[in-house]
Image: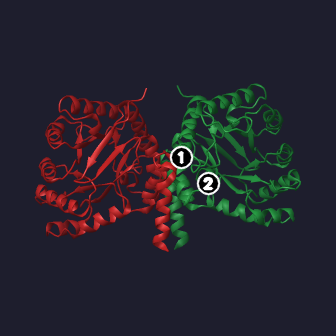
Chain colours: A green, B red
Amino acid sequence: MSAEPLETRLRSATKEVVIGHGHRFCIIGERINPTGRRIFQEQLRAGDFSAIERDVKAQVEGGADVLDVNMGVPLTDEPDLLAKAIQLVQSHTDLPICIDSSVVEALEAGLSVYQGRALVNSITAEDDRMAAILPLVKKYDAAIIALPNDHDEIPMEADKRLDLTAKIIRVATTEYGIAQADIVIDPLAMPIGADTGNSLVTMECMRRIRDEFGVNMTCGASNVSFGMPDRHTLGAAWLPMAMTAGLTSAIMDARSPQIVDSVKAADVFLNHDDWGMAWIAAHRAKQAASA
Amino acid sequence: MSAEPLETRLRSATKEVVIGHGHRFCIIGERINPTGRRIFQEQLRAGDFSAIERDVKAQVEGGADVLDVNMGVPLTDEPDLLAKAIQLVQSHTDLPICIDSSVVEALEAGLSVYQGRALVNSITAEDDRMAAILPLVKKYDAAIIALPNDHDEIPMEADKRLDLTAKIIRVATTEYGIAQADIVIDPLAMPIGADTGNSLVTMECMRRIRDEFGVNMTCGASNVSFGMPDRHTLGAAWLPMAMTAGLTSAIMDARSPQIVDSVKAADVFLNHDDWGMAWIAAHRAKQAASA
C-alpha cells in the first residue's frame, strides 16, 4: 500500500505554489547563490545587488516556480545580507522563496523579513541541526528541506537513507509539530561522474520515499552532471527519470531551455498537463516570439 | 520478487547485439519504412532503392544498433520487395535487422534471405496471428516482437495488457517452443495527444512486465508525440522515463541527435555506461568533428 501523496504549499505575499505528486513539477531556480561566482561575491561584498535583479528576471522568464536565495559569502554578515536579498527579490517577483543557508542566524533573519510561507533549505538528520532549525520552521510556519544524512556522511545505501528519512519525519512531526506535508526530503543526488551506480540508488530512494511516506522531494539537480561534459543534456535526461521515480521538485537551472523544456515534457507524460495544453501554449508563445 | 532479467540476442552475419535490462538501450532505427513517405513509395515501386542506402548510412551514423525494415507499399509484391531490401541493407551494414510486416508471406521471404538472427515485427495475442507467425520464428531461429492486444483492440487497462502478455508468453513458449528471452513485448505506447493519461498506463505496464516476466520490451517511440508540437523534445523526455520504467529498446528516430543523446544520457544514469566512458568518448568525437 502506498502512502497518501502530500501537498506542500508555499506562498509569497500574493501567490501560492503547490508541490505535490499530482501536480506539475516545481522548478526552484538555483541561480541566486554566490558559490563559485567570484564576481557576484565581490559585488555582494560591495553592496551591489544588481546581479540579483538580473537573476530574478532570467529565472522567472525561464519558467521558475520558486527561487532559491543563498547569500553564503565568506567574511560577510550573512544574516543581514540574506535578509536584504530576500526583500529585494520579493520586490521584483511574486514567486515564493527557498531560504538557503547553513547558518541558523541567517535562516532566522531571512524568515523574519519574508512575506508569505517559505521553504527553508535545509536540515539533516542530525539532532543538533533539527533542534536549531525546526523551532524556527514552526515559529514562522514554513516548510523545510531535509537531507537524510547524518554526521556529514552521505549514506550510499538506500536502506540507510530511508531510515534517516523516517527519523527526520518522526522527530519533526512528533517533537516539533511540523506537518508531514511540510517536510520535503532531498534524496541526495550525487555526481554520476563519481560513481555511475549513484543514480540508481537515488532513484530507488525516490520510489521508496514516495511509496512509504508520500512526502514531496527536491534535490540539487545540477549536481548529478558535475564534472561531466554536455551537462545540460544529462540534466535534461535525468530530471524526467527522477520525476518518473517520484521527485516532485528540484533546485535547478531554470535558465536552460533544454532542461526546463524537458521537465515540461515529462509533466505532459505524467498527466500533469491536461491535454498538453500548457505544452502547446508554450510552443505557440515561442513561435510568436520568434516570428 | 522480480523475475530474472532476460537477454535477447540478435545477429547479422558478423555482429551480435544484446537487448537486456542490464545493457545499454537498444536503438532500432525506424526510418526504412514507406508509411507516410510518398516519394519513397514511388521510388520503391519503380525499383529505385537508393533512398534505403541513404537511410542506412544516416541511421548508422546516428547511433542505431538495429535497423527496422518495412516495405509495406500498397499494390506491390511485398514479399519480393522486403527480401530485396533486406539483402540490400545487409550489404551496407553489419547491424542486425528487425523484419517488419503485417504480411506473413513477406516475413517469411525476409527471414529466408536474412543472414543472422533477426527480430520479427510483430505478432499480437490473437491466436491466428501467433499460429501463422510463431512457426516461422521458430524455424528461422528469430526473436519476436509481441503486442498485448487482441482482435485489433488496444486495451487501455494495464491489467488487460498484462493478461495478454502472460497469454502470449505461455502460448509462444509452450505451444511453439520459443524461448521467453526471445519474446520482446511492445507495451503499446499511444499518442499522448489522444489522452494524457496514456503514458502513465504504458509506464505501469512496463514496470509490471519487467517485474513479472523479466522479458525485454520495445515500442514505436515516435508514436507518443504524434500530433503534438516540438516532437523531438517530447521524445527526448519520454525515452528516459520509459527506460526508468523498464523499456530496453525502441523503434525510434535514430537520426535525431536530441533523442539519441537523451537515450545515451539515460544509459549513464541507469549504470549501463561504466564511468560514463561512452558518454565522454562521444563528446570528444563531436568536439573533434567540429574542430
Q: Position of residue A137 (x, y in %)?
A: 79, 38
What residue is drawn where x is 32% and y is 43%?
Answer: B186
Q: Nearer the viewer, residue A227 or A28?
A: A227
- Mark closer to the chain start, 1 or 2: 1
Q: Position of residue B143 (x, y in %)?
A: 24, 43
| Residue A196: mark in rendering | 1
What residue is drawn where x is 16% and y is 44%?
Answer: B140
**Badge 1: chain ID:** A
- Which type of secondary structure does the marked residue at label 1 adopt? loop
Task: Give amino acid for label 2.
Answer: Phe
Instruction: Mark 2: give few (<14), some (14-19) or many (20+) Cα within 10 Å.
Output: some
Task: Give amino acid for label 1.
Answer: Thr
Up the image or down, A211 lies above or below A291; here it is: above
What residue is drawn where x is 47% and y is 67%?
Answer: B286
Q: Quadrant of residue B70?
A: bottom left
Q: Position of residue B256 (x, y in %)?
A: 40, 62
Q: Is residue B54 left or right of residue B191?
A: left
Outermost residue, front direction? B14
Q: Is residue A102 left or right of residue A265?
A: right
Q: Total of numbered circles in the picture? A: 2
- Identify the residue position indicated by label 2 in the image: A226
Per the model, the C-alpha gap separating discs 1 and 2 is: 12 Å
Up the image or down, A197 lies above or below B254; here it is: above
**Badge 2: chain ID:** A
Q: Position of residue A144 (x, y in %)?
A: 73, 39
- Which type of secondary structure does the marked residue at label 2 adopt? loop
Q: Is residue A51 left or right of residue A148?
A: right
